[in-house]
Image (tube, rainbow, N blue to C red):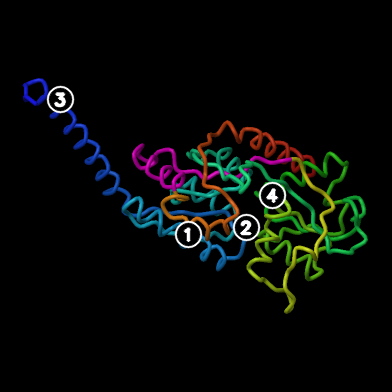
Amino acid sequence: MSITRRSLAGLAAVLAVAAAGSAQAQDWKSKYKELVLAAVPDENASGMTERYAGFVAYLSKQLGVPVKLRVANDYAAVIEGQKAGNIHIAQYGPASYARAFMIGAKIEPFGMQVNADGGKGYHAVLYVKAGAPYKKVEDLKGKNLCLVDPNSTSGNNVPRFAMDKMGIDPEKFFGKVVYAGSHENAVIAVAQGTCDAAWNWWNDADESNLKRMERKKMEVAGKPIMYSDFDIVFTSDKIVNSPIAYLSDLPADLKKAISDACFNIGTNDPEAFKKLTDGKAQPWVPTSHKEYQPIVELNEFVDKLKKKKS
């Protein structure tokens, strides 16, 4: 093979591009010496820490900078943290992502969770104790209801939308309406008898928050929480699955590195991903805000309901 001026010039151009790319990577690493990941709290703090430990370690290795997990007290903490730019990557529920977008957080959803069977949706369900006399929402008049968090999709917004369609104003219909703070706490409240019914997320009979609690061998007053100890008296229409989002102003190569790591975790670190999902999901797939515009509209509807009552 003969070396010509043209081939040398081409090689120089390739090397220059590679050098520029390497320099760009070094540039973002000098600015972002560590990254912060947070997720809306659908379980208790120790459970969140344990579930995300492998994923955080995996991201740190893939990105070449430390990734720190921020365990939030509530959904609003994640929303406000991304708006302030203090949380670089966040795993949301659909409604909490939409709320962050609505209040001006500069974020981009890049990945959507995928169910084990390839589905991209889940439901809000209303749990009662098995054997209770309640067979439908209307049977719970005057009883105590547990919601999850004001920014929870399956634990607040979809339930309020569904109950409004039934002609039910929760604050007038139920004896008491309380926010449990997490999906786990809502289930525990029903198990303890604090609430007669609680809203929660549910994919299908094989995967739900309640199934996760059963797998974790959680107990209430020494009694294991079992899926069979609860009945479902209402199931919503399908909700688009949850997104993971990063800050819009992150460097393009950093955003690509984050998304590539998430999309390829099933191959790169299957054990970390199994721990994160209990082996009940497939890795994220690409998504965009367009998928969540209907959830923005859902939030707007719930906001209007709130204004009517004030």
Mark 3 or mark 2, which is nearer the start of the sequence? 3
Q: Residue at x 50, y 37 (%)?
A: 286
The residue under label 4 is 203
In the rendered structure, the answer to whether residue 7 lies left or right of residue 114 reads: left
In the rendered structure, the answer to whether residue 135 lies left or right of residue 309 reads: right
Mark 3 or mark 1, which is nearer the start of the sequence? 3
Look at label 3 and name its amino acid.
Gly
The residue under label 2 is 42
Mark 3 or mark 4, which is nearer the start of the sequence? 3
Say above or below: 111 vs 206: above
Which is closer to the viewer, label 1 or label 4?
1
* Residue segment shown in magenta: 238-264
Say above or below: 218 vs 121: below
* Quarter of the figure that contains the C terminus: top right
Mark 4 or mark 1, which is nearer the start of the sequence? 4
Residue 264: % across, % down: 44, 46
The residue under label 1 is 271
Helix, strand or loop at label 4? It is: strand
Asked whether the residues under the numbered discs 1 and 4 touch, taking CB atoms below 8 Å apart as contact, a structural biologist would say no
Which is closer to the viewer, label 1 or label 2?
1
> Residue 212 falls in which quadrant of the image?
bottom right
Look at label 1 and name its amino acid.
Glu
Look at label 4 and name its amino acid.
Asn
Residue 258: % across, % down: 41, 45
Q: CA distance from mark 1 to mark 4?
A: 22 Å
The residue under label 3 is 10
